[in-house]
Amino acid sequence: NAHNTQKEKECRILVLVDLPYPLRKMSLNPLGCLVYDKEENDRVYYKFQRGVESYPTVGAPVILPTQHQLQDIVESGDNRRVCIGTSPLANGAKVMIDPDRLFGRHLAVLGNTGSGKSCSVAGLIRWSLDAAEKVRHSQPNARFIILDPNGEYSETFKDKVNVRIFSVEPKDEDIQQLQVPLWLWNSSEWVSFTQASLKTQRPTLIQALRSVREGVFNIEQSAHQEMKQYLRTLISITQIEINSGSPWGNFPKAKNFFEKLKKWRIGLTDQDVFDSNQQTCLTAITDKITHFEQARSAQYAIFDFDRTEINDFLQLLKTAYTSFGGSAMDALPIDADIPRPFSGENLLKSIEGNAELLGVSEYIDTMQMRIKTLLSDTRMKVLTSQIDGAKEMTLDGWLSDYIGDNNASNGTVTVIDLSLVPAEIAHIIAATIARMTLESLQRYRRMNQGQVLPTVLVMEEAHTFVKRYKDDTEYHNSSSICCQVFEKIAREGRKFGLGMMLSSQRPSELSPTVLSQCNSFLLHRISNERDQELIHKLVPDNLRGLLRDLPSLPSKNAILLGWASELPVLVQMNHLSAEHRPRSDDPDYWNVWTGQDQNGNPVAREVNWKEVADDWQQV
């Protein structure tokens, strides 16, 4: 037994491993591997590969990378086309990105006020355009659409050729009048603006939009054309009533449908300009309605209709519609969202006419009042209606002006200054521009064998447009409608060539859907704890330690991480000259107080409130 015990002790001694005793301890996150690439001019070059196939063994030495190795790590990756800055931690190695990665899967530029977000956004656009211009040797076929809620970018790209700048009150001949015609608004945007109620106002509004886009209730149309459109409206409403079961539904649905028929008869009056066939068709309809009325004239009449007599009535409407030049395909209800031009006055007339046909005239006053306010308020009218003396706005003309013409011949950058847009329609204007951009690119891809037209939509102060909202309410205001548009772009834009670059100082207020779809992040100084927590949730667990320096990052420095970078890297952004920066500098209190700048040059701020008041009151 003693012999066995001695042998066991010797075995235990043999399996002991002599480990080095640590003098210092360090916590590390494995990010990737440096793989030998080549050797030139007495220097070894490496390639960085993201991810780790096998972890280091216990006792493996830990060494600091050389400056050349750090440079190889930072400068790794394919298609490094645009230089955005240098890495202070890698001996000033150039940080270059692939625009396809940066813009193709959405980018979020986040940071506190004054941390350099706006300069980074302007720089990313400018440096990308400059790099493309060097390769193409001419103006690139690029499209950047900047939604600028604070009016910071009006001067930023003026050195570029044909930059298109739109503003509510243009003060310069290079700035155009911002126009988003009301006929571009879709039914959701109209519903949010008018706050149309679900049961009566909303169906009336949507039917009115269908009618006015088709030209029904056009003030300037002939009697023949007016009757044709009137019959088409009756066909559409009858089909809607049949689908809802009103003619044979529970009381009072059938009675309400019967009352509508009697009102319709008033508009089916013969006129001398109609030919004999048309008059015969109209008479057949009025006789049918009279027959319905006689059959339900008793004191305790039953108002229910059977399906046969309603189908016969619908066929009479279609026959009359055909006699006025309509076709079976024309009789199908038009989409309420097709962007066909119409005037505000015609929309009001369409609402009144459809409300009367639907028997809800007494319920539309508040909706009409809001639309009349839109048409009468000079601040909103100039944005949404045809301006006297200006060329008529067409859909193709609007797309060319705001998205860009063929080969970007009219410029690569569109700046949309939203700073003076009335609050009542600010979100709708932004939503309409964004939605029209997405839908136009969807149709472009469909008509070009799947090829996309790369476009970047830039949102400054993104929390203005994509603010969190509750989705459990019956009524969605214009802010939530706007957010839903950008959420759709975040989810689907990449497939149609629409990238998104958003900038915000409050990421915790942004829609989770939009933020989660951003694959790349440029993070400036962030000191708010709630915002820091959100940012930490957006990155993998093994990278969260790299974000500890966010609260102390100096201006002009940022951390680039995500799809656009092989690994998170600290970037000192390229210098942007003063004339190329957005107008977002800190107020120069001291210079104004003392009357001079740091170089001794005089600084004056003369005040003339009369000029401000006259401009404000438009006198």
Image (cartoon, grey):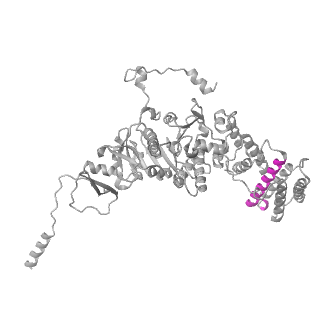
Viewer-side residue, 367 vs 250 = 367
- Percent of width and height locating residue 596: 40, 21
- Horizontally, residue 405 falls left or right of residue 215, namely left
Q: Quadrant of the N terminus?
A: bottom left
Residue 554 seen in this snapshot: yes
Given residues 559 and 300, the one toward you in this image is 559
Where residue 366 sits, quadrant-wise, is top right
Residue 254: x percent and y percent? 80, 58
* Magenta span: chief secondary structure: helix
Residue 478 visible, this orientation:
no
Front residue (pair 126, 58): 126
Per the image, is 533 magenta? no
Q: Position of residue 208 (x, y in %)?
A: 73, 48
**515 left or right of 345?**
left
Residue 82 at x, y = what percent? 41, 46
- Is 148 rendered above or below residue 44? above
**Quarter-of-image position of residue 94:** top left
Judge whether residue 234 is colored magenta: yes
Task: Give the vertical position of 376 relative to 465 (above or below).
Answer: above
Q: What are the residue bounds of the magenta stretch?
A: 224-248
Residue farthest front in this picture: 137
Residue drawn 56% across and 42% down? Answer: 409
Q: Nearer the viewer, residue 62 or 450?
A: 450
